Amino acid sequence: MLREEQIDIRRQRAKASRFVIENLTKKRVFSEYRVTNPESKGQYTVTVHGFDVGDNSCTCPDFKSNTLGTCKHIEAVLEELKDDLPAHLQKKKATFTRPEVYLHYGDPWRVGVHLPARHSDKLGQLAKRFFDDKGLWHGKGRFEDLIPEIQRVPEEVTVLSDAMEYIEREVEQADMLQKERAWLEQLGEGKIDWQPLHVPLYDYQMRGAIFLACRGRSILGDDMGLGKTVQTLAAVEILVRERNINRVLVISPSSVKYQWATEIQKFTSRAVQIIDGSPEARQAQYLEPTFYRLVNYEQVVRDRDAINAWKPDVVVLDEAQRIKNWESKTSREVKRLKSPYAMVLTGTPLENRLEELFSIVQFVDERRFGPAFQFLSDHRILDADGNLKGYRNLDTIREKLEPIFLRRTRAEVLTQLPARTDNTVFVELSDEQRQPYEDQKTMLARLMQKGYLTDVDRKRILACIVNMRMVCDSTFLFDKQTHVSPKLDELAELIPELLEDDAHKIVAFSQWETMVNEAAALFAKLDVGHTILHGGLPGKERQAVLKKFQTDPECRVFLSTDAGGTGLNLQIADTVVNLELPWNPAVLEQRIARVHRMGQSRPVRVVNLVTRGTIEERVLRTLEQKQNLFAGIFDGDDDEVTFTNVASGTLMKAVRDLLTDPKAGGEAVATARATIPGGSDVWRAAAAFLESLAASEAGPPDDVSELVKAAIQKLRTRLEQRPE
């Protein structure tokens, strides 16, 4: 009944559509037809062999996946033919004058053979060896033997292109599965003597790389922090060695493209190109040679034709939950990309609905779960009103997923994990953030151009810097009215993965109490148990907050300002989220040390949220490249720095290097240290100055002048004590 309903739906769609139909081979009935949709400009080829369901074929995606034996394009052609054809002729079938091997799009796909009425004995023997009485593959032979046998018969046998692709894929799959078994056996015995990347992999990562490479099109659903990127790069290197691939397309959220480029350059010797810019600039970039090409999901929607023209060997989807909605334009366009190999990365393959998993799997293997109508009928439980109550037959889903899906949790590979894994998650400035950010940046630039700075100017400089940092977190920190925060939006996406099972708990830090409260509102909306610690909390209440987090299994998140960065033992958690990076690496390490400390029995993952293309990214680069620049900023154990300013020229040099150099720090910072007398200490003082002033939402203090005097005296004393 269900299949008949679906066939009838396609017949109704055929009647409602205004297709343009052209006879390509000019045969009266049994011919090839081009079917064009004048609205979408889509074109497909229909081959007519008869008037019964299953007789014909179409090149459209629906025909290949629906297992019905028909589609709206076939039905439109048959409807037009029937109008001019007598009823008795509609019962005829096409006769085959030449033998051909074709692909039958039933359930499952099977290779078939059409034999002419007259054929040689050798061809007849070949048909019996490989095909059943209906001319369909019976599975008793081997695909690698079929083509050589075809070449030995007297007739010229046509192997249609889709059938040849299917046969080649099956032969390759069998070969790679054999290699996978051998490699895994060697890995288990510690006998693998080759490494695909510049750095050695953990055993579980090597297994993941082998899985991705050998399964052809597959999904890696490992927990966050287990190294899905490095496993993917290793799998690509295996395919280079085994299949000589040379074009890899990586699709990711826009802010993650740059992280991919960094990882590729770090672990491989491959050329990498980031697609960016105007439509004209992007079109020119697609013509350039490269091994890795990095695009974001939005660009696939605009540039799909150019991407397909490049003919990538591998398409990698990072954070593939972006295509979980099968009705979205992004999802449809991504699924129109063509490549022999595909690697899909997601820590959350199933977040809310089974349909999301179906959509992701559809990119890897459009027929793995069968047609959508059948999948939903088999697995959804609906009430009398058609509302979703739950899902059923999940064992069937797991069984179908097993050949293409690999997932390991942190608990499964606990003994192999490093003690700590740091992850940087980039987000983009929203439109609502960009204007106030640019306003503050412009004001800062004007102040820095002044030849002489007053105390008021220096206060304004610090206020601009603090405002830019706050805007990166949330517009609410800046205007106290709007609540736009891509960081919190991204955190909401990460939560299902970070709290994937009851064993995980999170400690999340922000410099600002307001941002902590914004995050608390998010967790309340997500119905995630949480608690809050900030500097204004009395000691007795602090203990109650800490005890709740440590003992209440429903309290999954500990939100804290840097007041909680010291003096707390939070080993009950195994994840640290920094809503922004403090400029002082000592403060950053203090945060992480609340969780990553003696007594911690599990590996710790650290997630840093950074807004790309802003002051935050530049600070990140400085911390990554030159962390020792900031070492020793503080002299004692006090929570606050005791000096807040240095000579204006030195301050301006520090600020200019940090804010105006697009590559953030690196060479510019080294130059500052080399050219300023006592440069190391001066830079430290400047960093301390910025950090201490930024630490307060109230902005720079009013008594700056007194602090300046104390700072300068302290700086002079330090410089006088330096050896010549």
Image (tube, helix red, strand yellow):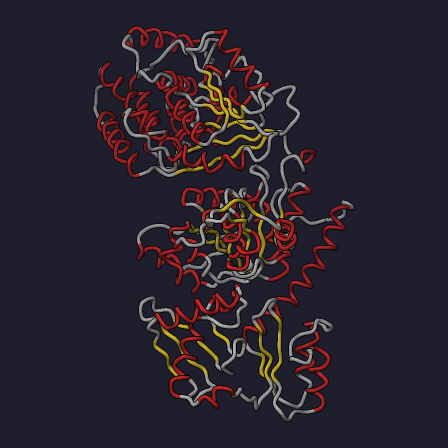
* Residue pictured at 31% horizontal, 27% vertical: 476
Q: Seen in the image, is 300 located left or right of residue 130? A: left
Q: Find residue 237 and report its horizontal and vertical position in percent.
A: 60, 53
Residue 170 higher or lower than 655, as above or below: below
Residue 252 vs residue 646, the one in the foreground: 252
Image coordinates of residue 384 in percent, x first then y, are 49, 49
Q: Is residue 708 above or below residue 307?
A: above
**How far across and down, in percent of the image, does residue 719 sit?**
41, 12
Q: Is residue 144 above or below residue 721?
A: below
**Residue sitting nearer the eye, 108 or 232:** 108
Say if 38 sits above or below 205 in the image. Answer: below
Task: Give the image location of residue 171, x and y in percent.
Answer: 66, 67
| Residue at x 38%, y 35% (from the top left corner) | 486
Residue that protrudes farthest toward the bottom in the picture: 118
The quarter in which the C terminus is drawn is: top left
* Relative to 29, 433 lies left or right: left
Please identify the residue farthest to the front as the structure is shown: 384
Judged left or right of residue 710, residue 443 is left
How many numbered marks, from 0 up?
0
- Residue 419, quarter of picture: top right
Q: Which of 197 and 113 is in front in this view?
A: 113
- At 58% from the left edge and 24% from the top edge, which residue is drawn? 553
